[in-house]
Image (tube, rainbow, N blue to C red):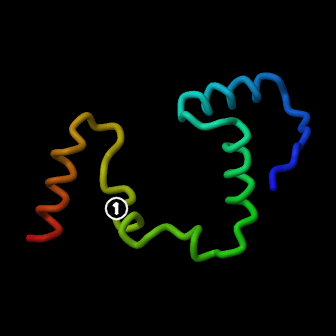
Amino acid sequence: MNTKLTLNIDQSVIEDAKFYAKNHRVSLSKLIENYLLSLTNKNEEKSKVSPLVESLTGVINLESNDYKKEYSDYLAKKYS
């Protein structure tokens, strides 16, 4: 069941949030609902990062322009 909620938030924050929501094709209400769900998630297992994602964290240098080459070099080194 959906319930109406009134919030007092700085106007510039609201504008930025609306822009973000529009760019991600989601309503501002859904964006806030998802955020609150993530904060109140009782099941810790769901919020953990998967082992695959954890193992890949930091593999790619975000300041480099050649992500594909760096990743293929990483995989070649890892599996050689």
Q: Report the number of numbered marks.
A: 1
The answer to which quarter of the image holds residue 76 is: bottom left
Q: Quadrant of the N terminus?
A: bottom right
Residue at the spot 59% in from the left edge and 28% down from the top edge = 22
Residue at the spot 77% in from the left edge and 23% down from the top edge = 12
Q: Work out whether 18 lies above or below 36.
A: above
**Which residue is farthest left?**
80
The residue under label 1 is: 56
Relative depth, front residue between 16 and 54: 16
Q: Work out whether 67 lies above or below 53.
A: above
**Label 1's element?**
helix
Residue 58 placement, left or right of 74: right
Residue 2 placement, left or right of 28: right
Q: Quadrant of the C terminus?
A: bottom left
The answer to which quarter of the image holds residue 13 is: top right
Q: Work out whether 59 lies above or below 48.
A: above
Amino acid residing under circle 1: Leu
Residue at the spot 20% in from the left edge and 48% down from the top edge = 70
State the image coordinates of residue 18 (x, y, percent, origin top left): 68, 28
Q: Residues within 10 Å of mark 1 (few under 14, many from 20)?
A: few
State the image coordinates of residue 78 (x, y, percent, origin top left): 17, 68
Relative depth, front residue between 55 and 45: 45
Residue at the spot 39% in from the left edge and 59% down from the top edge = 57
State the image coordinates of residue 27 (x, y, percent, origin top left): 66, 36
State the image coordinates of residue 48 (x, y, percent, origin top left): 54, 70
